[in-house]
Amino acid sequence: MEAFVLHTGFAVPLDRANVDTDQIIPKQYLKSIKRTGFGDYLFDSWRFLDSGEIGMTPNERRINRDFVLNEAKYQGASILLARDNFACGSSREHAVWALLEYGFKVVIAPSFADIFYTNCFKNGLLPVSLSEQEIDALFLYAMQGNRIEVDLEKQRVSVEDQSEFYTFEIAENLKKKMLSGMDDIALTLSQSELIERFEAMHRENQPWLFRE
Amino acid sequence: MNRTLYDKIWDSHFVGTRSDGNSLLYIDLQLLHEVTSPQAFEGLQMAKRPLWRVGANLATPDHNVPTESRELGMAGIKDLISLEQVETLNENCKNFNVKQFDILDKRQGIVHVVGPEQGATMPGMTIVCGDSHTSTHGAFASLAQGIGTSEVEHVMATQCLVQNKAKNFEVRVDGLLEEGVFAKDVALAIIGALGTAGATGHTIEYRGDAISALSMEGRMTLCNMSIEAGARAGLVAVDDCTLEYVKGRPFAPKGELWLRALESWKDLHSDDGAHFDNTLSLRAETIEPQVTWGTSPEMVCGITSSVPDPMAISDPVVSESTRLALGYMGLEAGTPITDIELDQIFIGSCTNARIEDLRVAAHVVSGKSVAKKIKRALVVPGSGLVKQQAEEEGLAKIFVDAGFEWRAAGCSMCLGMNPDQLGEREHCASTSNRNFEGRQGHKGRTHLVSPAMAAAAAVAGRFVDVRSFF
């Protein structure tokens, strides 16, 4: 996983609450056995007017000009501004893979669904929680074409000229993981004796859980 | 210290703190299916890591298996991309020696139906699966959670989940449910009251005499939809009903070991005076049969209500969401729910495809016919064994005689990854769990209901109050 320290980029405002993972990446694309190839289908049924299938490229599709991601001024945006309970629903990590592959590095919303929030940290997509009012302000900055800077070390989101900034909360352990980009599995396995010790005791206490 | 049920299961599976400060939680069972496991198996292979404990994994294909021509097995999967995914699961299970109920096994089915049916789901366990409806297994007082694919790989390699502990949420339902009102209605009423993010960051424990009165199947329906209120997991305490269900199932302990297990499971309830961070209380008598009218499970109301008016909602975000939802659903504000005309009926999914669900639906349609205007009415049993039992009990015949299509087990039209999908603008009375835009098919319009309500809607061609059938 790539480490995340600081990112500056243009932001696109997605003005909808409860955006679910079925919207972020519809089910027909989950048939893939890979971790890649999802970016073209991000927000598929909002970005396009036709119903797509795996393998289709955006230039074969009927573009929905009314959808905010398709507006000329938001092309190349790398920060997604969203509303409450972003990415609720299914556990599909494909949602995170699709957002990253499309080019997003940060999602800023008042709140996130739990499983999505966890999935972000496994892949280097930074979810940032700010208040509704702060996000309203960022919506305006984004619409005016200002770049936004997200500094994980300082836990700060600021407008590029530094005229405004907002601090955000993040669990220390998640922050550390994001800053280092370390391999989760390797880190856990480095303490495998801890797991072995627990497992031996657990097997003793509840042998019916160990059928093998 | 007085602990909640969640606290107890957490404590009994807490391995320790990792060097970076994260908690490690031991996982007893990982359920695998074809959609969220291939990338995890691939990750293991690339890093040349083995499964930590092979026997803690159980697999079955469910999400995109076709529900017709099952006797053809793999050859029945016409969609080549779906076929590759199911083949990949076969290969991975073979290479890693994971037990699988494959497409031709009569024990194949939806993972959340199969686990409990086999007794692989037992009280006090920690269970994960790359599927958000893993919360289903909480009905057995087991901490069961949906996880992402990276977490699936992590559990495969380490038998642990990296997690921070959630808060405790008590949802109480006391009183007596009316005839014709079921666990699904309770679940939808709770989500309506809490909102789709109401329990984010929490584990729900369902308590109260209306919950204790539910069968195990009802409890599974209820826990299944915990995620629709934002909670990763939902729990119900162990009682005799739980033990009776588990006893004698293939994976359940026998003899001496069963007695030891019983002793250990006795404690799987919240202590008196245990602390809950939040509480919601509902009276069972006030819950009507529920119908969703919008594009989120929280957009729900009783059968005697009408579609809400966005103009009458003061919160601008809620008002706008309501307006967008009505636009998508093609519904006018103020329309009585009983005036909503339907095109398709779907009885199935990990929420409502167990034998009890099929019995209730069959009771409603028995001797009647699916309305002419309904283009398709599907019954998709949750597993091959549920299918077999329903056939033996004569339920399948009741459905077929009434004009339903009787299919083989799988997730089917709950998410339409297989050929079972809604057409554009078609309204469907569905016993599944999500009414998100496009979930059951591009531009399809889903209304979530109980199996009894779906069956009654099939007969009437529109929603009717199923209480009159009981």
Image (cartoon, coloured by chain):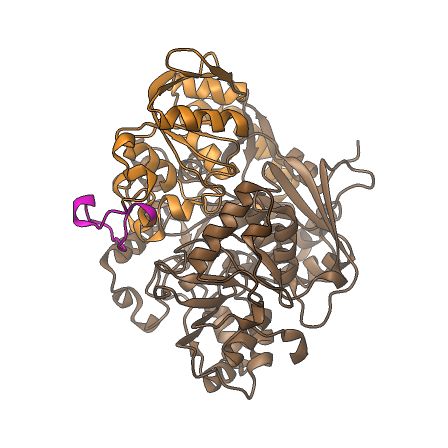
Residue A135 location (% of width, % of height):
48, 27
Residue B383 vertical placement versus A47 (above, below): below
Answer whether residue A212 is magenta in the image.
no
Viewer-nearest residue: B130 or B312: B312
Return the x and y of residue A185 as percentages of the image width and height. 42, 28
Q: Is residue B247 visible?
A: no
Specify the farthest residue to the front.
B311
Q: Which residues are magenta?
A: A46-64
Q: Quadrant of residue B376?
A: bottom left
- Whether residue A47 appears in magenta in the rendering, the answer is yes
Residue at image location 61% in from the left, 50% down from the top: B138
The C terminus of chain B is located in which quarter?
bottom right
In the picture, measured across the screen, residue B146 lies left or right of residue B179, that is left
Front-lying residue, B419 or A189:
B419
Output the letter for the chain in brown.
Answer: B
Q: Is residue A191 above or below residue B177?
A: above
Chain A: what color?
A: orange
Residue furthest bottom in the image? B367
Q: Residue at x 41, y 63 (%)?
A: B413
Report the residue that reaches farthest toward the left.
A60
Residue at the far right: name it. B272
The quarter of the picture where residue A99 lies is top left
Image position of B379 with respect to B274: above or below: below
Position of B143 compared to B149: left or right? right
